Image (tube, rainbow, N blue to C red):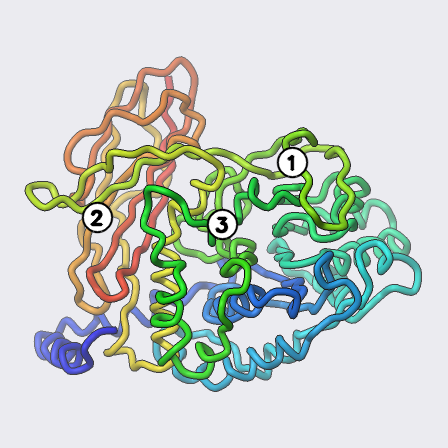
Amino acid sequence: MKSPNLKNLATGILAALVISPFLSASHHESAVPPEDRARMVVLTDMGADPDDEQSLVRLLLYANQIDIEAIVATTSCWHQNSIRPDFIHKIVDAYGEVQPNLLQHEPGFPTADAIRAIVKEGIPKYGMTGVGDGMDTEGSDWIIQLLDNDDPRPLWISVWGGPNTLAQALYTLRQTRPAAEVERLVAKLRVYTISDQDDSAMWMRREFPGLFYIVTPGDDYGQSTWVAINNVHDGIDNSSISNPWLAEHIQQGHGPLGAVYPDVAWGVEGDTPAFLGLIPNGLNVPDRPDFGGWGGRYELGTPALVSLGVGGSVVVWLPEPRPIWTNADDTYRPFRPSLQKRAIEKSDREFTGNQVTLWRWRDDFQNDFAARMDWCTQTYAEANHAPVIKLNHPTKLTVPSGGSINFDAYGSYDPDGDSISYLWFHYPEAGTYDGGVLATGGAENFDRYHVGAPEVDEAVTAHFILKITDKGTPALSSYQRIIVTITP
């Protein structure tokens, strides 16, 4: 938390110098245009594990950046015969108390009444026992209604428990609509599910081969990508998922919404990765899971059943019938502060694995969460806000083989007047250039940066990420992805 007195003084000085546009611009520039917001339906087995409650608290803080179109109470293999919409309403009530304060920081936060109107119920039955004739619910009907509207954007289904509400919607569509129309509507769906928590998941993947599906199948959660949000990893700082950190930055002293964020029982926020990749932060590209982002990175393929493992749930696992978006590996060497000369340096240790694709961003999205929790109770002058990136060239560049790639973000700034730090880096796994990390020139923490393009025999792409971080508290990061096509 920043000192209110220092921030108010700084604000007065900025206004006196007629550079207060930093403050006014931030309110406008942080608003996400409707066409850039993802449409999302949440299916949650609320009440099975407090992590669903934790994830909903976080999600509502991004309700102005993601169009939440339904929150459906469902079952799962851990919560088979009941649904708990009352848990959802309790958190929405708490959100309603802080929503006016959130609007001081960014526009577009919906009212609590608007969110209450989209809380729906699934069927209190497990998996495929709740799919079939006569099994329609207000949740499954609502999904069909959302698919039928004229909005051209995809409809994301963020599955935190069992997905049988979606399965019932698909069943009903197939029973009542022509095959071509069903195919068209299925093409609008995007599913990101936290493992497979009932047997309707495999049914959907078999019966609807065109369904876009992100999942680590099987019930050995230790192999999943999403578990990186709460796993403790050797060799990195894990403090931002610790219980003391949650108590200080989320639960206590942050108003009624923080107060309803429960203690961890099994793992903190295991469901949150199902929507992290939808936040429009300049890094995430929802329709391209292979590009990587806050929700992890996934590649299209058919995983072998033998690699999935079998845990202790009641779900019966079968071989995957077709390619799905599933685990992919990143190799990552973090940067760390340097005491002298260049302000940052590469760490001594390199990490490789599918969970690396998510935890590499973990401190950034935890700090972003903490800052938004501050917004629940603090004024604009008291709180921190993310830097604004000013890129002085297009986000897609084309350069010839062996040429020079030049980047320029001079003029980027922080809306609070904080000092900012730059970091440019190549993200090899996101592009098609398979020559590894590109040779670079200059300092990767300068506002301008250049890279020598490799010699290539065919056109390839290379992804570069600009990350700008302020020195406020908590430190906040903004990103810009630049995709470079290198031609022969």
- Vertical position of residue 472 compared to residue 313: above or below: below
- Residue at (43%, 84%) from the top-left corner? 100
- Vertical position of residue 282 compared to residue 121: above or below: above
Of residues 193 and 100, the one drawn nearer to the viewer in this rendering: 193
| Secondary structure at numbered mark 2 | strand
Mark 3 — residue? 295
Q: Label 1 is placed on what type of residue?
A: Leu
Query: What separation in Å lies between label 2 and label 1 (alpha carbons)?
Result: 40 Å
Give the crowd class for mark 1: few <14, some 14-19, many >=20 residues within 10 Å.
Answer: some
Q: Which mark is residue 40?
A: none
- Residue at (17%, 67%) from the top-left corner? 417
| Secondary structure at numbered mark 1 | loop
Mark 2 — residue? 422
Disc 3 vs disc 1: which is toward the camera? 1
- Residue at (40%, 55%) from the top-left corner? 281
Mark 1 — residue? 308
Q: Is residue 467 left or right of residue 292?
A: left
